[in-house]
């Protein structure tokens, strides 16, 4: 991904973290959806170019992303209906971020395998970020650990978070906003430092 694409993807991921339920099982669903959308989106665009549908590529990509998200939600309803109901429209946020990001990718002059190798690391990084924030909110906000299970989700109670007044705050939207703001600020700080070091090395 280009720097602009990474920045857009990071901002979109932070927005998803804020509005998503603070449960690890929801983070796992999001991470899986992010990775599938990116991989299948790249493969779909390569296929459309192969069959000479370049002029309709943007429209077809939009249709593919939306229909895949609908299909993903239907599978989630079959496997874990409670989680599908809990996540609701939030499941469509990864499709918006993926559709926006693919237009910022530099696909010119590279093969399909090179395209996958160039974009998958960033996707896996953001999926890991989703898992980490969801884990923190689940464990410290609710005092539980939730994992996917067929037909439901498994919940392990670790401790009573109500006994520590600051803990439940992490499970709320303001708590998620605070976590993502701190993370985004740290990311921008490191990105600026590395960019300065890179320019100094080049010059």
Image (cartoon, rainbow, N blue to C red):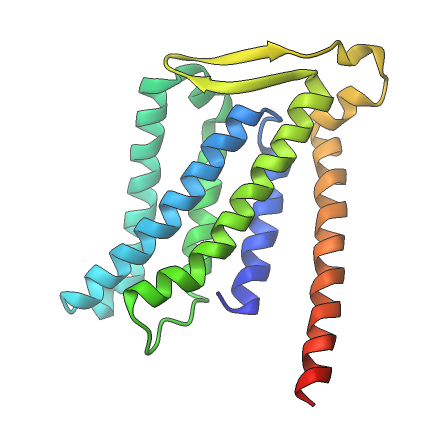
147 to 32, vertically: above or below: above
Residue at position x 32%, y 57% from top? 42
Residue 165: x %, y % from top left: 86, 17
Q: Position of residue 172 (x, y in %)?
A: 71, 26
**Residue at 43% across / 64% down in the picture?**
118
56 horizontally vs 34: left or right: left
- In the image, residue 66 sits, relative to residue 115, either above or below, namely above
Q: Is residue 126 left or right of residue 84?
A: right
- Whether residue 60 is situated above or below residue 160 in the rendered picture: below
Question: For residue 203, what is the image quadrant?
Answer: bottom right
Q: Is residue 166 left or right of residue 4?
A: right
Residue 37 appears in the figure:
yes
- Residue 146 percent location from the top left of the image: 55, 18
Q: Does 87 appear above or below 121?
A: above
Q: Residue furthest bottom?
A: 203
> For residue 91, which quarter of the picture?
top left
Q: Nearer the viewer, residue 99 or 25?
A: 25
Tell me which residue sits at (77%, 14%) in the image.
Answer: 161
């Amino acid at each position: 991904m280009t720097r602009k694409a990474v920045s857009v993807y990071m901002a979109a991921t932070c927005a998803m973290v804020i509005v998503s339920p603070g449960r690890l099982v929801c983070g796992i669903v999001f991470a899986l959806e992010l990775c599938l959308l990116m991989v299948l989106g790249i493969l779909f665009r390569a296929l459309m170019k192969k069959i000479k549908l370049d002029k309709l590529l943007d429209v077809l990509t939009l249709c593919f992303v939306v229909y895949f998200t609908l299909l993903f939600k239907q599978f989630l309803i079959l496997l874990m209906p409670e989680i599908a109901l809990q996540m609701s429209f939030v499941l469509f946020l990864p499709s918006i971020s993926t559709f926006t990001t693919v237009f910022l990718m530099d696909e010119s002059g590279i093969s399909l395998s090179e395209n996958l190798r160039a974009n998958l690391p960033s996707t896996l990084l953001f999926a890991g970020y989703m898992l980490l924030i969801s884990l923190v909110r689940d464990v410290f906000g609710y005092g539980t650990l939730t994992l996917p299970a067929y037909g439901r989700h498994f919940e392990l109670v670790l401790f009573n978070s109500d006994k520590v007044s600051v803990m439940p705050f992490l499970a709320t939207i303001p708590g998620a906003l605070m976590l993502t703001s701190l993370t985004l600020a740290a990311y921008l700080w490191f990105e600026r430092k590395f960019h300065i070091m890179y320019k100094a090395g080049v010059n």
